[in-house]
Amino acid sequence: MKRKVREALLAYLFLVPSFLILGTFVFWPVAFSFVLSFFRWDFKNMRNPVFAGFENYREIFRFFPPMNHSFAEAFLWTCFLIFVSMCIVVAVYGTVRKNRTAWFLLIASILLYTLSEPLSRTFVLGLCLLFFIVAILRTKQHLSKHVAGLIAAVVGLTAFMLTFDKRFYTVVDFLLEGRDKNLFVKAMFNTFYYVVLSVPITIGLALGIALMLNSNIKLRTFFRTAYFIPFVTSIVAISLVWRWIFDDAYGLLNYFLSFFNVQKIAWLKDERWTIPTIAIVSIWRIVGYNAVIFLAGLQSIDRSYYEAAEVDGANAGQKFLYITWPLLSPTTFFLLIVSLINAFKVFTEVYVLYSGLPGPYNNSGLTMVYYVFDRFYVQQRMGIACAAAYVLFAIILIFTLIQFKVGRNVVEYVS
């Protein structure tokens, strides 16, 4: 007993320096900033912050003029549409996978709905779904009660749309309406736009590069080093170089686009290109790191799986779908989490590309981290900055928990 206590005490003594460093530079600032998010701490109250409760959180979500719909309504509509969409997907998969007539009607319905006029789309949607359901019910394939219930949900949604002819108000609509009435919502919209644009492209390109580097090509070592160098290079230096490349008058990018008869694009001056410009720089910098991680995952896959697949006559596509992709799921899961967190924290590229401004005009490059930086260092409203930082923390935490929840059912670990 004394020996176990002595070993535990010795282990904690070795951990004390680490705990002191983490506590001083991580845990204490995090806890202190959370407390300060409930105080009015600005230039006037620098020495004596005043407790304000949730005033800072209400301030960052105050709209002027007021919104036409509440966030609760948008969130409920979004949850409803996600649920119905899942029902439709499961019902369609369970009924049309062996029914060619249903497949034909489904594709025809999508095309007809896309090409129809906006005012008549509700009627067209109901008509197409009616024919589609009739084709399903006429099939000889046995329908389970579960699938029949999902089809009933589709019919109910169609009846609802035909009866009320109402436009659904989702979270996306809330952000689109609120971005011109609130700077923090504008920052949220820009950040989500950047995340959706950059993360999938980065993962896809990294996987393609890793597959290429894992094949038997010449100069593999050179290409691996070349792709990884941008990641270890200073972000400021990279952004400065890309700032010259994006120049609309003398930039290298517009010069190459001119060979394809593409007119010059004002990359750094046009509001529409602000987030894509930032995404291009980030993708170019991060794709090499993700490719190296994917490459490590590819090299950890046992070759015996591929040899067995070749004996069974599998082609390259089948080997990728049924061997490579499932066994790469742990690596993909890790990269998705890391990429998503890093994407939500984008700041340096915006600051350097636009010379300390949140975009060319109209705050088109304002991200959530830039909003925190502006409130803290520029406006000296530290309480609001702390509140905004914890809203960002909550958003990242929610998305990370969702990924962990989904990852338990999707990721395949091979021992």
Image (cartoon, rainbow, N blue to C red):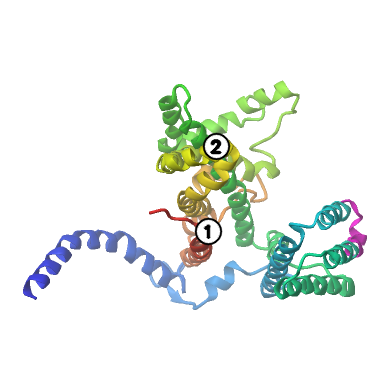
Q: Residues within 10 Å of mark 2 (few under 14, many from 20)?
A: some
Q: Main secondary structure of the magenta part?
A: helix
Q: Quadrant of the C terminus?
A: bottom left
Q: Identify the disc placed on residue 410.
A: 1
The segment highlighted magenta reads: 115-124
Question: Which of the 4 image quarters holds residue 101?
Answer: bottom right
State which tag comes first along the sequence, 1 or 2.
2
In the rendered structure, which amino acid carries the disc numbered 2?
Gly
Number of other residues with Cα within 10 Å of mark 1, as a class: few under 14, some 14 to 19, many 20 or more: some
Q: Identify whether 227 is placed above or below 40.
A: above
Residue 359 drawn above or below residue 164: above
Q: Which residue is mark 2?
A: 208
Q: Is residue 313 visible?
A: yes
The answer to whether residue 117 is magenta is: yes
| 89 or 161: nearer the viewer | 89
Q: Residue at x 76, y 24 (%)?
A: 261
Classify mark 1: helix, strand or loop: helix
Q: Is residue 219 above or below residue 105?
A: above
Q: Would residue 21 be found to the left or right of residue 210 on screen?
A: left
User: The residue under label 1 is which amino acid type?
Assistant: Val
Residue beneath the point at 89% across and 51% down: 115
Q: Nearer the viewer, residue 245 or 414?
A: 414
Give the distance between the C-alpha atoms of the residues marked 1 and 2, in whole angstroms: 21 Å
